[in-house]
Image (cartoon, coloured by chain):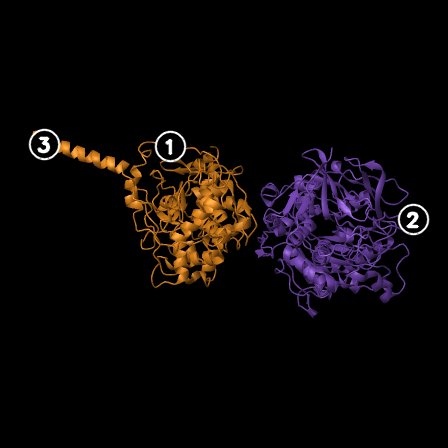
Chain colours: A purple, B orange
Amino acid sequence: MARTEKKKNVVLVGFGWTGAILGMELANEGLEILALERGHDQATVPDFQYPNMIDELKYGVRLGMMQKPRNGTLTIRRDQNETALPYRSLGTFLPGIGVGGAGTHWNGLNWRPMQSEYHLRSYTEEKFGNIIPEDMTIQDYPMSYAELEPHFDRFEYVAGISGQAGNVNGKIVEGGNPFEAPRSRDYPMPPMHSTWDGKKFGDAAKAMGYHPFPSPGGIASKDYVNEYNMQMGPCNHCGFCERFGCYNYSKSSPQTAIIDALKRKKNFEYRTHADVLRVELAPDGKTATGVTYYDEKAQEEVFQPADIVILTAFSLHNVHLMLLSGIGKPYDPNTNEGVVGRNYSYQLTGGYTLFFKDENFNPFIGTGANGMCIDDFGMDNIDFAKEGFIGGAYWRSGQTNGQPIRSMGLPAGTPSWGAGWKKAIGEWYGHSMNIGAHGSLMSYRGNYLDLDPTYKDPRGRAMMRMTFNWQPNDLKMIQFMKSKMEPLVKSMNPDIAQDGFKKDGAMFDVRPYQTTHNTGGAVTGDDPKTSAINRYLQAWDQHNVFVMGASAFPQNTQYNPTGMVGGLAYWAAEHIRKDYLPNPRPLV
Amino acid sequence: MKKLVRVLGVLVVLGLVALLAFIFVPVQRTGPVTQLAADFKPAKGQGEYVMRAGDCLACHTNEGGKPFAGGRAIQSPMGTIWTTNITPDKETGIGNWSLDDFRAALYDGVTPNGTHLYPAMPYENYRKMSEEDIVALYDYFMHEVEPVSDKVEETKLGFPFNLRFGLRAWNWLAASYEPGFKPTTGQDEQFNRGKYLVEGAGHCAACHSPRNLFMAQDGIDDTSKVFLTGGEIDGYTAPDLRGRDSGPQKWTTEQTAAYLSTARNAHSTATGEMMLVVRDSLQYLTKEDNMAIAAYLKKIGTAPANSASATPAAPIVTETEKMLTDAKADMPLGPRLYLDNCGGCHFVTGKGAGETFPELDGNSLVTAKSPKGLISVILHGAELPSTADRPMKMRMQGYDKRLSDEEIAALATFLREGWTNKAPAVSAADVKAVRDLAHH
């Protein structure tokens, strides 16, 4: 039997970065806000506390902070001819669970996309002519970088990002990224110091005429107080960032940046173990009336009425809820019609591992956003027509951790156990470094999300089905990166160098970890035929439904997505506050 | 012989009469120190503000209980004192009290029926409050506080402390000074506002002044040399506020004010009882009032002002820092435990980081006369209250499950002797005593 709760002005589905941002911004408007989080509550102490958190086996290997597939997963296949099977064992991407969401267990790498990325289709067509493949469905963002800039800035100052500006209002700053889109001011904190691998890489890159700069990240380089008076303490480089909650108040997260300030507001409430099953629509389908969630403590369904419903869950969950609730027309790749599930995208990375007998990298020192980067092979700097692909990558070198189970680089051919393995560990631990290329991924007709016809989740709902495979354009991009990285690696003169770049014809493999940068599926756009939400992240058909998160990306950026997710959330929050609340209606 | 008997008899009778008078003649109750206009009405919010400044809520509310309904146990050297219900309930609270009754409780420590209050109620200090504040506070309790019918446990101390009339004599020593506040002439308004809050409602001396032979506050205002030079509460050291190395003297006025309103500043954080004072009282004071308190404390410093904090001297690398940086394998247990458990936040310098990780070098909690506070923080951690200016409930985790009594003793001893600290060692028995408290 469902119970009905007291109506709220706003219900937020998911209490991670975007839920916390929208909660704060709208609570400041005096609205009654409720955030529903399907996971548990968690705070720095006791949940991330030292030394319990720095347990590689529990969190790094057994994925203690991630959602359990048995409580809900999706099915995956590589193309329409395959039968999708449930993703039963987490590998290639790791959706988090609990208050703070993925914002608690990320590495902290924080970027703004490059200038060409906001209008990628028109930029490509104008600059390089008619080169976009027929099945590539990339499109422009419906807002410009200039419009988003204040919101990127806001997020960086709330989250607490350390970095070196390279372009402040058009003025190039020595030591920063000269290719970045112009920012209105410096980062809120100076950059982190780089470890020796980053330094070596930066020096080699500079010698080749590239433009190295310190990696920007949500890792505090000093003590910090943000606009909500929330605090961070300086990082001690323990190297337990990705897959872990930070015990040191040093990694940017909803917990360090927003939540305690939000909790002080009497008009804000959050409930945990509240798994939203669907958004409920009015009989005419033109508005949402609230959400139905499963209350795991009471073991019953609850109808939560609300004036506004904002999906603030992980990108995949946002899309799943839209498909289950009838918000927007589901995408059909055969007709190329429909919008929900369209333009699902991911990330393509590659890199080199370099072994140096005589170097000691002290890998136990690190952070998730450590090291030096170059953007010389970013999208703005590539001739798509000449190179034969659309895309780009930033490169980075900087150890993130020295954890013994997953972070002991060994030369290819080393036995994976026994005396040979032991000998190799003795010989090589601490003597290797990596250089990574973090590449873009375009969107295609064949890569999409829909509801699975066979498999159901524990609540009896159809699971979401992911159809995804690598495409020639992007594999060409990553091979290009290899060709450019190889000479740089050689110039560093390692004893052994081995590459990890996907080759032409590579197939998507869900087993090894790649990234949790799942994007698209509910993209923002100007045309309701090719986008699920308008430029204010508002559903085209239900004006009181807004959808945050990386599901809005028309294709994936070459960078880590969090900066864009935060910028879009502040952008949407401003328009909801200033434009929608005084007169609720379709804003476009 | 007969004469001697007669004289003795007269003396006994006189003594008895005096004793009976001492016990039964009602105490003279103090009247208003200022005659207010008949139509005086406190400004809106003033009563609640005075309540916050006086921190009435903290003692008169039980953990999880209704506000001001009393029932909280206050541990005193004489035994457990149970705080009373001060809601306007007519049966079990103070609903029948007149303004004069109310003032007498605050000034003289007597209830309407003449019963003496135990001085856990700081009437020694409240005696300095202005009539305006008394009226505002009375008005607040009568009209803004929800009446709660709840008979709280009666305080029953052992002999001779159960003979409350004895407090009459104690009061001659402790609370016989002329009531009301005497500003210091020649000092500015800010100084005197700070002085009023510190000496009166804020009752800082209740913890921060030493106690004399009779357990009365030794110094209730700044005319006393020992006023606010440190005291003890329940075995914890309440630090000196006036000496050269004390917080209010080392820190800038702004830093002290930040400590009072947010429980944290660039150097230190408030823990234990002081954290509760910030949580329940000081964070609600205006910025101006906390600045006034800080400015006043600075001015009553007993040693020449230390200008070092304004312009930090070039950092000196201490022997402790060198040892921690070298991290040799034969390092003693204390510093090794420090590196394994503490250094990640507090660093090898012992300087921590602004407003997040407190300094351990020169920290009054670390070097306190009684190590109980330091041991307690190591065992159980500490949490900062959420305040308007600093909403984050930053928390240090406890190490009670990770470190043994011997290890904590070694660690605490290292902290008390490390960097520029010089305080006596801590024993495993000291740690055990504090650890055992948690099991009660």
- Residue A290: image tag: none
Q: Which chain carries label 3?
A: B
Q: Quadrant of the N terminus of chain A?
A: top right
Residue sitting at x 87%, y 55%: A136
User: Is residue B54 something one can see in this rendering?
Assistant: no
Nearer to the camera, B207 or A303: A303
- Residue B156: image tag: 1
> Where is mark 3, residue-wise?
B4
Q: Are marks 3 and 1 in contact (CB under 8 Å)?
A: no
Q: Distance between the residues labelled 1 and 2?
A: 85 Å
User: Is residue B291 something one can see in this rendering?
Assistant: yes
- The type of residue carrying mark 2 is Asn
Q: Which of marks 1 and 2 is in front?
A: 1
Circle 3: is it few (<14), some (14-19), or many (20+) Cα within 10 Å? few
Residue sitting at the far front? B38
Q: How far apart are marks 3 and 1 (CA)?
A: 41 Å
Residue sitting at x 53%, y 54%: B353
Looking at the image, residue B258 sits to the left or right of residue B165; the answer is right
Q: Which chain carries label 2?
A: A
- The type of residue carrying mark 1 is Lys
- The type of residue carrying mark 3 is Leu
Q: Which chain carries label 1?
A: B
Q: How many labels does the image show?
A: 3
Q: Is residue B25 above or below residue A113?
A: above
